[in-house]
Amino acid sequence: MIIQEHVALQSFNTFGINSTAEYLIRVKNKDDIHHAREFAQSKNLENWILGGGSNLLFVQENQPGLCIKSELLGKKIISETSSHILLEAAGGENWHEFVEFCVQKNWGGIENLSLIPGLVGASPMQNIGAYGVELKDVFHSLDAFHFPTGEIHTFSKADCGFGYRESVFKRKYTGQYLIMAVRFQLEKFPRTNTRYGAIEQTLLEMNIANPTIQDVSKAVIKIRSEKLPNPSIVGNAGSFFKNPVISIEYFEKLKKEFTQIPSFSTNSPDQVKIPAAWLIEYTGWKGYRKGNVGCHPKQALVLVNYGNAIGRDILELSHEIKVSVKSTFDIELETEVNIR
Ligand SMILES: Cc1cc2nc3c(=O)[nH]c(=O)nc-3n(C[C@H](O)[C@H](O)[C@H](O)COP(=O)(O)OP(=O)(O)OC[C@H]3O[C@@H](n4cnc5c(N)ncnc54)[C@H](O)[C@@H]3O)c2cc1C
């Protein structure tokens, strides 16, 4: 078991930010994780988990402690009925490849989540979502290694406390668990979900009238490839901010001044969600560039590293955007990306 020291992390995060891990260990099985825990305890080190690095902004030049890079692989069928399949994927599996595997087998439920970067183990962290589907819609349970005790704990959907880009792992249990395996309940005779965003329009352009889940996956890939900057070309971590949720009462008040302000319904009849991209664009940040950092010209929610930006430059830009949005709309934007 190799533990590396002073490891450059630039190629391990989609922002492409230079930062150095004090120690780094690649874990491929349970024994490796135990070993990592013992090493961290023996040196009194904090440990932190690295997946695909697509939802992380490194603001420290040196990352103290032990970086545990999840490389646990494997997929297996746990059980099957005539209508459903319960499938387990190890935390180090690539998310999009896992989606493609399921789509090819015609197991439906996650096709709308095609092309989201990162690994399976991080998917429950922020209850990933796109095009009208969230991880929680297909989530069954997960196994996670608990660093304080060295035990493996199983979490049901209710235990995970999923919310909009939220789970207990993101806040309550920060840094305590490594998600080792996730189980998904998928449909063998899938119904497609094409109502959200540009999916229907894209399927029309593709001349598809009765789409299969394979078609939906292709449409989502097409939309995402056209709309979102590719991190291998320009560093980014997808949406930097969450869409704010505000009361209907406050929304009605805002509408009087900002007549074009859009909104989406939420699960609560008293609240609406406002697209953060609209607020950012309205305040003039879309396409803004200062040195090596900027707000993407096609997608205002995405902050980008055009070259050799440091994490603090991106964080600073995010603060400036927050201040603008706050002073114009009296709405606090919340950061979606994990800062460390
Ligand atoms: C171009 C682009 C588009 C994106 N689009 C979307 C989108 O549509 N929807 C969406 O929800 N997200 C989106 N994202 C964000 C990102 O892809 C997801 O949040 C993804 O799940 C992060 O996975 P990761 O493996 O890269 O996690 P990392 O960035 O490595 O880690 C993220 C956080 O999870 C923790 N973590 C990682 N793995 C584990 C584990 N096994 N156990 C415990 N903790 C862990 C880390 O410590 C960190 O705090 C996008 C990102 C990019 C770059």
Image: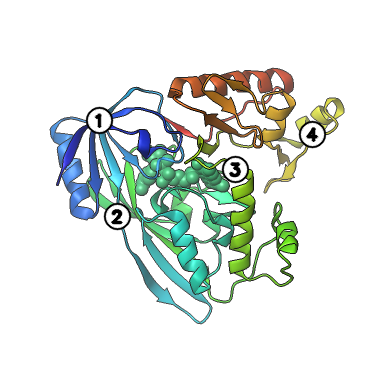
Distance between the alpha carbons at the discs numbered 1 and 3: 33 Å
**Left or right, residue 195 beside residue 16:** right
Q: What type is the residue that disc 1 sits on?
A: Gly
Asked if the beta carbon under badge 3 is closer than 8 A to the nearest atom of ligand 1, the reply is yes
Along the line of sight, the residue nearer the viewer: 135 or 268: 135
Q: Secondary structure at mark 3?
A: loop
Dots 3, 4 in contact, CB < 8 A: no
Q: Is residue 188 above or below residue 127?
A: below
Distance between the alpha carbons at the discs numbered 2 and 3: 28 Å
Would you name the residue on which mark 4 appears?
261
**Which of the marked residues, 1 or 3, is nearer the chain's N terminus?**
1
Residue at 60% in and 61% down:
218
Q: Is residue 23 above or below residue 95?
A: above
**Left or right, residue 236 beside residue 16:** right
Image mark for residue 312: none
Residue at 15% in and 31% down:
43
Would you name the residue on which mark 3 appears?
228
Q: Is residue 133 visible?
A: yes
Q: What type is the residue that disc 2 sits on?
A: Leu
Along the line of sight, the residue nearer the viewer: 166 or 4: 4
Residue at 36% in and 69% down:
76
Image mark for residue 72: 2
